[in-house]
Image: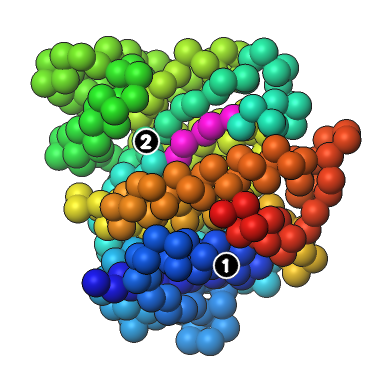
Amino acid sequence: MSKSILVLPGDGIGPEIVAQALKVLDKINQQFDIGMVFEEGLLGGAAIDAHGVPLADATLARARAADAILMGSVGGPKWDKLDRAIRPEKGLLKLRSELQLFANLRPAILYPQLADASTLKPEVVSGLDILIVRELTGGIYFGEPRGIRTLANGEREGFNTYKYSESEIERIGRNAFEMAMKRNKRLCSVDKANVLEATVLWREVMDRLAPEYPEVSLSHMYVDNAAMQLVKAPKQFDVVVTGNMFGDILSDAAAMLTGSIGMLPSASLDKNRRGLYEPCHGSAPDIAGQNIANPLATILSAAMMLRYSLDQEPAAQAIELAVSKVLDQGQRTGDIMSAGMTQVGTDAMGDAVVAAL
Ligand code: IPM
Ligand code: MG
């Protein structure tokens, strides 16, 4: 049975890194006889240039019909001055929201070969394996009302709404408890319940779910402390569950623990585990087109796609093992380069992973 994959390379380094993931997936397709069929679409700035909107209805329809979506990155200075409603990022946010991809899994794993690439001391990060479960379709990213308005005195005011319903909290909470069950059974829920009512309710719902997962030990942490603990003693965490904005921020911090944000993949899943797979990093317009970007986060996102949406665990593991082998061989893109290693470009890194398969 064939599996249709919609590929959305996006902007900046997106097309270069996605091309590497496609090379790897082609090889995997042959080796494991998965029957993936790829079609490309436009998202973000690329879609604005072609259609005037960051996500065309036709592309959204193709996304709905696909078995999985593989994405690069969106955005860049070229589109920064556009009206807020048609910014490149809006295309991605619409895709997440329309497809109800509420569960964003962001694993931060330190490959032992990269212990020196982290800005933190090797003993602080060695063996690190955290999973951040970020709520992705609610919270302040989507809350209404929102906007910039002019007050009676003529001054302008920007405003957003931070809200979470019980059902939204419950579904991401269940997801996180289930992830914790498959790992080391520790779940830390991150909130700001000392200040924000929306997160008082968040904490309450997490506590209410806890007895249903008696093997999982649930703890709570305020987001400011969580940011500090992530850089102080990150190995205390197993699974972290948090809202959309806190998850955005904490996952960038967690990424650096692993040496480079260029190593961090992600999966955004709906309730049936259909999903969108993308690296956690952005479109890096400053290095786009130079064949120097690290494609490993996208290649590892492709592995997550095989695992979660296509039910191909052995194929997912084969990719992860191939990435590890390439790191053993000493091949490094600039962002993870260290003394004695061999610096390679985007394309060569992709080829190296294919060869390791
Ligand atoms: C991410 C990105 C996005 C987000 C942007 C591009 C809208 O930073 O996936 O972390 O804020 O969610
Ligand atoms: Mg982000």
Q: Is residue 156 above or below residue 3?
A: above
Which of the two discs, 2 and 1, sits closer to the camera?
1
User: For the point 43% across and 49% down, which residue is it?
Assistant: 316
76 left or right, relative to 291: left
Residue 133 — which label?
Answer: 2
The prevailing secondary structure element of the residues shown in magenta is strand
Kind of residue at badge 2: Val
**x, y percent for residue 46:** 56, 77
Q: Which residues are magenta?
A: 106-110
Residue 310 — which label?
Answer: none
Secondary structure under tag 2 reads: strand
**x, y percent for residue 357:** 56, 54
Q: What residue does disc 1 label?
A: 23
- Rendering colour mode: rainbow
In the current view of this chain or complex, which residue is farthest to the right? Answer: 340
| Front one among 221 and 210 | 210
